[in-house]
Image (cartoon, rainbow, N blue to C red):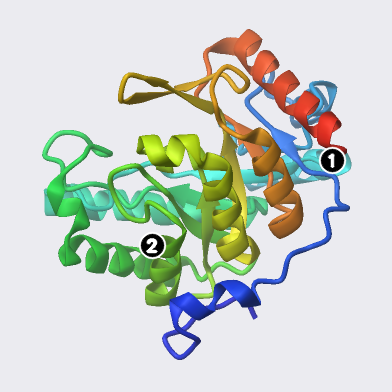
Amino acid sequence: MNRITRRTLPLVALAPFVRAAEPTKRLRLGGPIFLNSQDPVELAREHRRLGYRAAYCPAMATLDDAIRLAAIVKAYAAEDVVIAEVGAWRNMLDADPNTRRANLDYVSQRLTLAEAIGARNCVDIAGSFHPKLWDGPDPRNYSKEFFDATVENCRKVIDAVKPKRTKFTIEMMPWAPPDGPDAYLQLLRAVDRDGFGVHIDVCNIVNSPQRYFQNGALIEECFRKLGRWIMSCHAKDIGPTRVHLAEMIPGRGGLDYRAYLRSIARYAPDAPLMLEHLDGAAQYEEGKRHIQSVATEIGLPL
């Protein structure tokens, strides 16, 4: 079983028991597409034309249209395109109780959609106690209140849906837990649900000069410790401007994509790597080609 419970080994003893897969599977790269179509067959084929074998959940997928959902599932399966993730992107820790309740209901609906469409995961962030920014920095984000509320929120969402085919995941962030592999292990143990998994966004946790210059080791640590629970990953790059680290197109920054691709292949070979946060088709094409070139260089098929 992949489940961590309070009765399992202490966190420091977990890492040596994570079994690494042999890096023989083709990795699944994915990203947004820019085809103006509502036809699931055309959309699935466009992913393959671009060299993608994974996709974000199509925006047209809704729970109130079972026929369209079935058509999406059929079309994407026919092209061997995995739906990597359904985004939830709501602040589950909003200070207003009514807004927080509405956000949790929305996240539960998105997890229900992920289950219905067979996505690998539904992903959100834990949220923030920042008074204005749903993902903003706030000292209270490192409080016991934040951690306990996040555990409760994850359990509420999972228990409301009881997913069997998908997982609920929390994206790691630079200024709120989970902000690294050990923090995610702690959250996994505390949530204590089979329906909970891991989402990796390496750039989000490269939040210091030390982590930037040693990001290959950070990447390997994340996958070594969390690999069996990783459902999908995000792809972009990050580079320094004085002490500011900014997201950028893969290949233009300093993220160690050799370590990233090798770690996915070894520890989480079924987790799609999804390009995100770029500006238009040309930038996604540039990022995709960089990742493809790195994969070719190190002998990993995509």
Q: Residue 143 location in percent, x, y?
A: 17, 61
Residue 288 in the image: above or below residue 118: above
Secondary structure beneath disc 2? Answer: helix
Sequence order check: which comes first, mark 2 or mark 1? 2
Q: Quadrant where the C terminus lies?
A: top right
Q: Using the image, tell me which numbered label, if any, was put on residue 183.
A: 2
Q: Residues within 10 Å of mark 1 (few under 14, many from 20)?
A: some
Q: Residue 232 location in percent, x, y?
A: 61, 48
Q: Nearer the viewer, residue 209 or 195?
A: 209
Left or right: 6, with 1 as reference point = left
In the displayed image of the protein, which residue is found farthest to the top? 282
Secondary structure beneath disc 1? Answer: loop
User: Is residue 273 visible to the viewer in this orientation of the structure?
Assistant: yes
What amino acid type should be assigned to the residue bearing mark 1?
Leu
Q: Nearer the viewer, residue 14 or 217?
A: 217
Q: Nearer the viewer, residue 28 or 95?
A: 28
What amino acid type should be assigned to the residue bearing mark 2?
Ala
Which residue is drawn at the image coordinates 29% and 49% (left, top)?
A: 176
Which residue is drawn at the image coordinates 73% and 46% (left, top)?
A: 262
Residue 16 in the image: above or below residue 271: below
Q: Quadrant where the N terminus lies?
A: bottom right
Left or right: 11, with 287 as reference point = left
Residue annotated with mark 1: 300
Q: Using the image, tell me which numbered label, if any, was put on residue 286.
A: none
User: Could you say which quadrant of the image residue 78 lies in?
Assistant: top right
Which residue is drawn at the image coordinates 39% and 67% (left, top)?
A: 187
Q: Residue 72 location in percent, x, y?
A: 72, 40
Q: Nearer the viewer, residue 254 or 234?
A: 254
Q: Residue 71 location in percent, x, y?
A: 75, 41
Left or right: 119, with 148 as reference point = right
